[in-house]
Image (cartoon, rainbow, N blue to C red):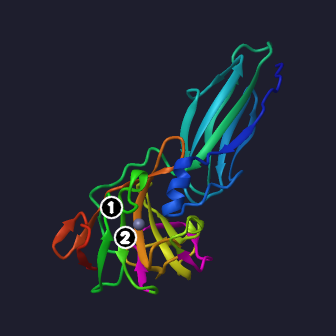
């Protein structure tokens, strides 16, 4: 078998404008370069490509192959999802006609979240504060002040700094930020919000933002049930004052996120929350 290796391997972390846009409002960190790698396992008549994701969240990987006298076990290009903290066999390449020259190369890019995630609309979210406490929703879905574009399905709960924040839905903590101390209307605060990001079992994420300095009480990788305390509210990042910004996010093809509408359990039943109304955690 004469195999010439023209495998030139490039890992590109996709940092898109959309991601930055979400980052501005709710703070998902850009995916780390080289946090996803591909390992090549030699076989007798070819090679197996294995994707390794070192992030706690799933990533979508787009892999493009250039083959010479080789056949892929999967379609080309391939778009697939590697779960968090795991290895996944992506495909196998086999020599087509033995004893003639063959080779392969690939390029890939990856981005946060699964583009195949489908939100479970049957879930009734829990209001993200202490049972019996009430807070006004200062900005709701499609809020004129800043809930626009990909962030349109976000909620701003009015609350004083230091209010206990509880998980609205069960999941795994996949990202936290707690080092920032300040916030304000100036654009320099755009990427300086503290937050907790929780991955749900349907592949969507909930984000709780603008928490106070050191105001995160969970750690990365931790599993949380609904109604567990996860931190304390604050006014870090790009804000006009103390509040909790809550949003459920789904990964977009090509990178970045789009917010999605969800319903909450309230005393009046399972509802889409409305701006300027006050809701008691229940
Ligand atoms: Zn907001």
Q: Does the numbered disc 2 mark a residue whose Cβ is under 8 Å from ligand 1?
A: yes
Which residue sits at x=78%, y=30%?
7
The Cα atoms of the two marked residues, 1 and 2, are separated by 9 Å
Whether residue 27 is situated above or below residue 18 in the rendered picture: below
Image vertical order of residue 92 relative to residue 82, above or below:
above
Please provide the residue range marked out in magenta.
163-183
Please check the rendered image and state whether residue 42 is part of the magenta-colored stretch, yes or no.
no
Q: Would residue 28 appear left or right of 277 to someone viewing this image?
A: right
Residue 126 can be seen, yes or no? no
Say left or right for 83 vs 267: right
**Callout 1: SS:** loop
First-in-chain label (1 vs 2)? 1
- Callout 2 crowding tier (Cα within 10 Å): few <14, some 14–19, many ≥20: many
How many C-alpha atoms fall within 10 Å of the one at disc 1: few (<14), some, or many (≥20)? some
Residues at discs 1 and 2 in contact (Cβ within 8 Å): yes
Residue 251: percent from left, percent from top: 47, 49
- Location of mark 2 (residue): 156
Residue position for label 1? 143
Q: Quadrant of the C terminus?
A: bottom left
Picture coordinates of residue 26 (x, y %)?
Answer: 49, 64
Quadrant in the picture for the N terminus: top right
Q: Is mark 1 within 8 Å of ligand 1?
A: yes
* Mark carried by residue 259: none
Question: Which residue occupies 57% across, 56% down?
Answer: 84
Ligand 1: image quarter: bottom left
User: Where residue 56 sits in the image (x, y, percent)?
Assistant: 58, 60
Q: Is residue 189 left or right of residue 114?
A: right
Residue at 32% x, 72% y is 138
- Residue farthest left in this picture: 268
Q: Is residue 199 above or below residue 90?
A: below
Secondary structure beneath label 2: strand
Q: Residue furthest front?
A: 186
């Amino acid at each position: 078998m004469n195999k010439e290796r023209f495998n030139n391997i490039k890992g590109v972390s996709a940092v898109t404008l959309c991601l930055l846009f979400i980052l501005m409002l709710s703070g998902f960190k850009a995916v780390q370069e080289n946090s996803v790698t591909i390992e090549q396992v030699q076989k007798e008549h070819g090679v197996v490509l294995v994707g390794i994701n070192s992030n706690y969240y799933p990533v979508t990987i787009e892999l493009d192959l250039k083959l010479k006298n080789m056949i892929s076990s999967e379609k080309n290009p391939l778009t697939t999802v590697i779960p968090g903290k795991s290895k996944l066999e992506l495909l196998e390449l086999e020599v087509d006609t033995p004893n003639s020259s063959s080779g392969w190369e690939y390029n890939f890019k990856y981005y946060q979240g699964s583009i195949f995630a489908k939100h479970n609309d049957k879930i009734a979210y829990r209001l993200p504060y202490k049972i019996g406490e009430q807070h006004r929703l200062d900005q709701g879905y499609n809020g004129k002040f800043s809930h626009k574009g990909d962030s349109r399905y976000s909620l701003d709960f009015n609350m004083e700094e230091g209010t206990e924040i509880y998980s609205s839905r069960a999941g795994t903590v996949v990202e936290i930020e707690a080092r920032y101390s300040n916030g304000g209307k100036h654009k320099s605060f755009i990427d300086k919000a503290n937050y907790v990001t929780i991955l749900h079992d349907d592949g969507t994420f909930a984000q709780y933002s603008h928490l106070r300095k050191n105001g995160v009480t969970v750690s990365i990788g931790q599993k949380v049930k609904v109604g567990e305390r996860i931190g304390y509210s604050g006014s870090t990042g790009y804000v006009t004052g103390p509040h909790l910004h809550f949003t459920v996010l789904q990964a977009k093809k090509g990178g970045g996120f789009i917010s999605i509408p969800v319903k909450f359990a309230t005393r009046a039943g399972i509802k889409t929350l409305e701006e300027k109304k006050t809701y008691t955690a229940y």
